[in-house]
Image (cartoon, rainbow, N blue to C red):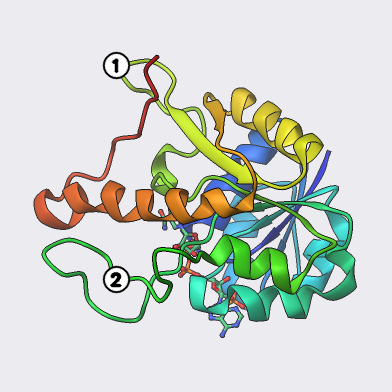
Protein backbone atom coordinates (compact mmCIF):
# COMPACT_ATOMS: atom_id res chain seq x y z
CA UNK A 1 0.00 0.00 0.00
CA UNK A 2 1.09 3.61 -0.61
CA UNK A 3 0.90 5.70 2.55
CA UNK A 4 1.15 9.49 2.67
CA UNK A 5 2.08 11.00 6.00
CA UNK A 6 1.38 14.68 6.56
CA UNK A 7 3.76 15.74 9.28
CA UNK A 8 7.40 15.74 10.34
CA UNK A 9 7.17 15.25 14.12
CA UNK A 10 7.50 12.22 16.40
CA UNK A 11 4.15 10.70 15.36
CA UNK A 12 4.88 11.08 11.66
CA UNK A 13 8.28 9.44 12.12
CA UNK A 14 7.00 6.58 14.32
CA UNK A 15 4.22 5.72 11.88
CA UNK A 16 6.54 6.12 8.86
CA UNK A 17 8.93 3.59 10.42
CA UNK A 18 5.97 1.31 11.18
CA UNK A 19 4.54 1.39 7.67
CA UNK A 20 8.00 0.77 6.15
CA UNK A 21 8.56 -2.13 8.57
CA UNK A 22 5.25 -3.62 7.46
CA UNK A 23 6.19 -3.42 3.79
CA UNK A 24 4.36 -0.27 2.67
CA UNK A 25 5.66 2.66 0.61
CA UNK A 26 5.79 5.99 2.47
CA UNK A 27 5.93 9.62 1.38
CA UNK A 28 6.17 12.14 4.22
CA UNK A 29 4.89 15.67 3.68
CA UNK A 30 6.34 18.74 5.35
CA UNK A 31 6.55 22.44 4.55
CA UNK A 32 10.31 22.16 5.01
CA UNK A 33 11.90 19.02 3.55
CA UNK A 34 15.31 19.74 5.09
CA UNK A 35 13.77 18.93 8.47
CA UNK A 36 13.26 15.30 7.45
CA UNK A 37 16.41 14.76 5.42
CA UNK A 38 18.38 13.00 8.18
CA UNK A 39 15.34 10.84 9.03
CA UNK A 40 14.84 9.86 5.37
CA UNK A 41 18.55 9.04 5.04
CA UNK A 42 18.36 6.62 7.97
CA UNK A 43 14.96 5.17 6.97
CA UNK A 44 15.33 3.55 3.54
CA UNK A 45 12.16 3.69 1.49
CA UNK A 46 10.86 7.00 2.87
CA UNK A 47 10.27 9.66 0.20
CA UNK A 48 9.78 13.35 0.99
CA UNK A 49 7.53 16.07 -0.38
CA UNK A 50 5.00 18.70 0.61
CA UNK A 51 1.62 18.21 2.30
CA UNK A 52 -0.17 17.99 -1.09
CA UNK A 53 2.40 15.45 -2.34
CA UNK A 54 1.77 13.20 0.68
CA UNK A 55 -1.99 13.54 0.17
CA UNK A 56 -1.66 12.69 -3.52
CA UNK A 57 0.71 9.75 -2.95
CA UNK A 58 -1.23 7.91 -0.26
CA UNK A 59 -3.98 5.38 -0.77
CA UNK A 60 -4.19 5.94 2.96
CA UNK A 61 -3.00 9.23 4.45
CA UNK A 62 -1.96 9.98 8.04
CA UNK A 63 -2.55 13.45 9.47
CA UNK A 64 0.07 14.04 12.16
CA UNK A 65 0.45 17.78 12.61
CA UNK A 66 0.11 20.18 15.54
CA UNK A 67 -3.59 20.31 16.41
CA UNK A 68 -3.88 24.08 15.99
CA UNK A 69 -2.44 23.70 12.45
CA UNK A 70 -4.55 20.71 11.40
CA UNK A 71 -7.20 22.68 9.49
CA UNK A 72 -4.49 24.64 7.69
CA UNK A 73 -2.59 21.43 6.86
CA UNK A 74 -5.75 19.89 5.36
CA UNK A 75 -6.29 23.08 3.36
CA UNK A 76 -2.70 22.92 2.07
CA UNK A 77 -3.14 19.23 1.16
CA UNK A 78 -6.03 20.38 -1.02
CA UNK A 79 -8.15 18.27 -3.35
CA UNK A 80 -5.62 15.43 -3.19
CA UNK A 81 -7.27 14.25 0.03
CA UNK A 82 -10.76 13.90 -1.46
CA UNK A 83 -12.17 10.39 -1.21
CA UNK A 84 -9.17 9.15 0.79
CA UNK A 85 -8.99 7.45 4.15
CA UNK A 86 -7.20 9.83 6.52
CA UNK A 87 -5.97 8.54 9.85
CA UNK A 88 -6.29 11.61 12.07
CA UNK A 89 -3.87 11.38 15.00
CA UNK A 90 -4.24 15.03 16.00
CA UNK A 91 -5.33 16.44 19.34
CA UNK A 92 -6.62 19.97 20.02
CA UNK A 93 -3.85 20.92 22.44
CA UNK A 94 -3.72 24.64 23.24
CA UNK A 95 -0.50 26.64 23.41
CA UNK A 96 -0.82 26.79 27.20
CA UNK A 97 0.93 24.81 29.95
CA UNK A 98 -0.74 21.74 31.51
CA UNK A 99 -2.65 22.37 34.76
CA UNK A 100 -1.43 19.85 37.37
CA UNK A 101 -0.53 17.53 34.50
CA UNK A 102 -3.77 18.08 32.56
CA UNK A 103 -3.25 19.38 29.04
CA UNK A 104 -5.39 22.33 28.01
CA UNK A 105 -7.47 22.06 24.84
CA UNK A 106 -8.68 24.78 22.48
CA UNK A 107 -11.97 22.88 21.97
CA UNK A 108 -14.83 22.51 24.46
CA UNK A 109 -16.70 19.38 25.61
CA UNK A 110 -19.37 19.33 22.89
CA UNK A 111 -16.90 19.91 20.08
CA UNK A 112 -13.79 18.19 18.72
CA UNK A 113 -10.99 18.73 16.26
CA UNK A 114 -12.15 15.54 14.49
CA UNK A 115 -15.51 17.14 13.74
CA UNK A 116 -13.97 20.46 12.72
CA UNK A 117 -11.76 18.65 10.18
CA UNK A 118 -14.62 16.53 8.86
CA UNK A 119 -16.85 19.60 8.48
CA UNK A 120 -14.09 21.53 6.69
CA UNK A 121 -13.38 18.67 4.25
CA UNK A 122 -16.60 16.64 3.90
CA UNK A 123 -15.26 14.45 1.06
CA UNK A 124 -12.37 13.15 3.15
CA UNK A 125 -12.91 9.92 5.09
CA UNK A 126 -11.38 10.91 8.41
CA UNK A 127 -10.83 8.22 11.02
CA UNK A 128 -9.72 9.50 14.40
CA UNK A 129 -7.10 7.03 15.62
CA UNK A 130 -3.66 6.95 17.21
CA UNK A 131 -4.42 10.12 19.20
CA UNK A 132 -4.61 8.33 22.57
CA UNK A 133 -1.13 6.84 22.85
CA UNK A 134 2.43 8.17 22.75
CA UNK A 135 4.48 7.74 19.60
CA UNK A 136 6.80 5.19 21.25
CA UNK A 137 3.96 2.66 21.59
CA UNK A 138 2.24 3.20 18.24
CA UNK A 139 3.75 0.27 16.38
CA UNK A 140 3.81 -3.26 17.81
CA UNK A 141 3.96 -2.19 21.47
CA UNK A 142 4.87 -4.69 24.17
CA UNK A 143 2.63 -4.63 27.24
CA UNK A 144 2.25 -7.35 29.91
CA UNK A 145 -1.53 -7.01 29.55
CA UNK A 146 -1.44 -8.00 25.87
CA UNK A 147 -2.53 -5.96 22.86
CA UNK A 148 -3.92 -2.57 23.86
CA UNK A 149 -7.11 -0.99 22.51
CA UNK A 150 -7.16 1.86 20.02
CA UNK A 151 -10.45 3.73 20.14
CA UNK A 152 -11.41 4.95 16.68
CA UNK A 153 -14.22 7.10 15.27
CA UNK A 154 -15.37 8.24 11.85
CA UNK A 155 -18.34 8.43 9.51
CA UNK A 156 -17.23 5.87 6.91
CA UNK A 157 -17.46 2.20 7.96
CA UNK A 158 -15.17 0.94 5.18
CA UNK A 159 -12.53 3.50 6.11
CA UNK A 160 -12.74 2.37 9.73
CA UNK A 161 -12.40 -1.27 8.62
CA UNK A 162 -9.19 -0.40 6.69
CA UNK A 163 -7.78 1.45 9.69
CA UNK A 164 -8.73 -1.46 11.98
CA UNK A 165 -6.72 -3.80 9.71
CA UNK A 166 -3.70 -1.51 9.94
CA UNK A 167 -4.07 -1.34 13.72
CA UNK A 168 -4.24 -5.14 13.95
CA UNK A 169 -1.04 -5.47 11.91
CA UNK A 170 0.56 -2.88 14.21
CA UNK A 171 -0.32 -4.94 17.31
CA UNK A 172 -3.54 -3.22 18.43
CA UNK A 173 -7.19 -4.10 18.70
CA UNK A 174 -9.49 -1.40 17.34
CA UNK A 175 -12.66 -0.38 19.18
CA UNK A 176 -15.05 1.52 16.92
CA UNK A 177 -16.87 4.20 18.94
CA UNK A 178 -19.10 5.30 16.04
CA UNK A 179 -19.33 8.44 13.90
CA UNK A 180 -16.97 11.40 14.09
CA UNK A 181 -18.75 13.01 17.07
CA UNK A 182 -17.13 10.30 19.22
CA UNK A 183 -13.92 12.34 18.76
CA UNK A 184 -15.37 14.44 21.61
CA UNK A 185 -14.66 11.45 23.85
CA UNK A 186 -11.51 10.15 22.13
CA UNK A 187 -9.53 13.38 22.13
CA UNK A 188 -9.67 13.82 25.96
CA UNK A 189 -8.10 10.34 26.26
CA UNK A 190 -4.93 12.18 25.24
CA UNK A 191 -5.25 14.35 28.36
CA UNK A 192 -5.72 11.26 30.53
CA UNK A 193 -2.87 9.39 28.81
CA UNK A 194 -0.45 12.31 29.40
CA UNK A 195 -1.13 12.80 33.15
CA UNK A 196 1.27 10.03 34.33
CA UNK A 197 3.84 11.49 31.95
CA UNK A 198 3.65 15.06 33.21
CA UNK A 199 3.30 14.10 36.89
CA UNK A 200 5.56 10.98 37.18
CA UNK A 201 7.57 10.96 33.94
CA UNK A 202 5.81 7.70 33.03
CA UNK A 203 5.23 7.75 29.28
CA UNK A 204 4.79 4.07 28.36
CA UNK A 205 1.24 2.80 28.82
CA UNK A 206 -1.94 2.35 26.79
CA UNK A 207 -5.67 1.85 27.27
CA UNK A 208 -7.42 -1.50 27.10
CA UNK A 209 -11.16 -2.04 26.87
CA UNK A 210 -12.17 -5.04 29.01
CA UNK A 211 -15.48 -6.77 28.42
N1 LIG B 1 3.81 13.17 20.17
C1 LIG B 1 3.03 12.14 20.47
O1 LIG B 1 3.50 11.15 21.06
C2 LIG B 1 1.56 12.16 20.08
C3 LIG B 1 0.77 11.04 20.37
C4 LIG B 1 -0.56 11.01 19.92
C5 LIG B 1 -1.07 12.10 19.21
N2 LIG B 1 -0.27 13.18 18.98
C6 LIG B 1 -0.83 14.28 18.18
O2 LIG B 1 -0.30 14.08 16.87
C7 LIG B 1 -0.03 15.35 16.24
C8 LIG B 1 1.45 15.40 15.85
O3 LIG B 1 2.23 15.39 17.01
P1 LIG B 1 3.84 15.42 16.94
O4 LIG B 1 4.30 15.47 18.35
O5 LIG B 1 4.33 14.35 16.06
O6 LIG B 1 4.17 16.76 16.15
P2 LIG B 1 3.85 18.31 16.46
O7 LIG B 1 5.11 18.94 16.94
O8 LIG B 1 2.63 18.44 17.31
O9 LIG B 1 3.51 18.84 14.99
C9 LIG B 1 4.50 18.99 14.04
C10 LIG B 1 3.86 19.12 12.69
O10 LIG B 1 2.91 20.19 12.69
C11 LIG B 1 3.08 20.94 11.51
N3 LIG B 1 2.75 22.35 11.73
C12 LIG B 1 3.10 23.13 12.80
N4 LIG B 1 2.64 24.38 12.62
C13 LIG B 1 2.03 24.40 11.41
C14 LIG B 1 1.37 25.40 10.66
N5 LIG B 1 1.25 26.66 11.12
N6 LIG B 1 0.83 25.07 9.47
C15 LIG B 1 0.94 23.82 8.98
N7 LIG B 1 1.57 22.81 9.65
C16 LIG B 1 2.11 23.10 10.84
C17 LIG B 1 4.56 20.81 11.18
O11 LIG B 1 4.71 20.99 9.79
P3 LIG B 1 6.14 21.09 9.09
O12 LIG B 1 6.60 19.69 8.92
O13 LIG B 1 5.86 21.75 7.81
O14 LIG B 1 7.00 21.89 10.03
C18 LIG B 1 4.88 19.40 11.62
O15 LIG B 1 4.70 18.51 10.55
C19 LIG B 1 -0.44 16.41 17.26
O16 LIG B 1 -1.74 16.86 16.95
C20 LIG B 1 -0.41 15.67 18.59
O17 LIG B 1 -1.32 16.21 19.53
C21 LIG B 1 1.03 13.25 19.40
In whole angstroms, how far apart are the C-alphas of marks 1 and 2? 31 Å
User: Circles 1 and 2: CB distance less than 8 Å?
Assistant: no
Seen in the picture, residue 116 relative to 69 is either above or below; the reply is: above
Q: Position of residue 133 (x, y in %)?
A: 40, 44
Q: Residue at 27% across / 65% down in the picture?
A: 103
Seen in the picture, residue 31 relative to 124 is either above or below; the reply is: below
Checking the image for residue 161, the label placed there is none
- Residue bearing the label numbered 2: 104
Give the residue furthest to the front: 110
Q: Is residue 129 left or right of residue 58?
A: left
Seen in the picture, residue 5 relative to 157 is either above or below; the reply is: below
Q: Residue at 56% across / 68% down in the picture?
A: 65
Q: Position of residue 145 (x, y in %)?
A: 31, 16
Q: Is residue 31 visible to us here?
A: no
Image quadrant for the C terminus? top left
Nearer to me, 25 or 154: 154
Q: Residue at 88% across / 62% down in the picture?
A: 82
Ranked by sequence position, the earlier of labels 1 and 2 is 2
- Residue bearing the label numbered 1: 144
Q: Position of residue 76 (x, y in %)?
A: 76, 80
Q: Is residue 67 visible to us here?
A: yes
| Rendering quarter of residue 113 | bottom right
Nearer to me, 10 or 211: 211
Front tag of 1 and 2:
2
**Residue at mark 2: C-beta within 8 A of ligand 1:** no
Q: How many residues crowd around disc 1 within 10 Å: few (fewer than 14), some, or many (20 or more)? A: few
Amino acid sequence: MKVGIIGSGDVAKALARGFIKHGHAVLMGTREEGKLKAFADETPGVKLGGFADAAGFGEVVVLAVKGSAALEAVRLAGNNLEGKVVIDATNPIADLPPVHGVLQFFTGPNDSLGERLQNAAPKVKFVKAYNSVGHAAMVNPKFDGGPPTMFIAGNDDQAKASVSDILKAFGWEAADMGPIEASRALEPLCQLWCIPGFTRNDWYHAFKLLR
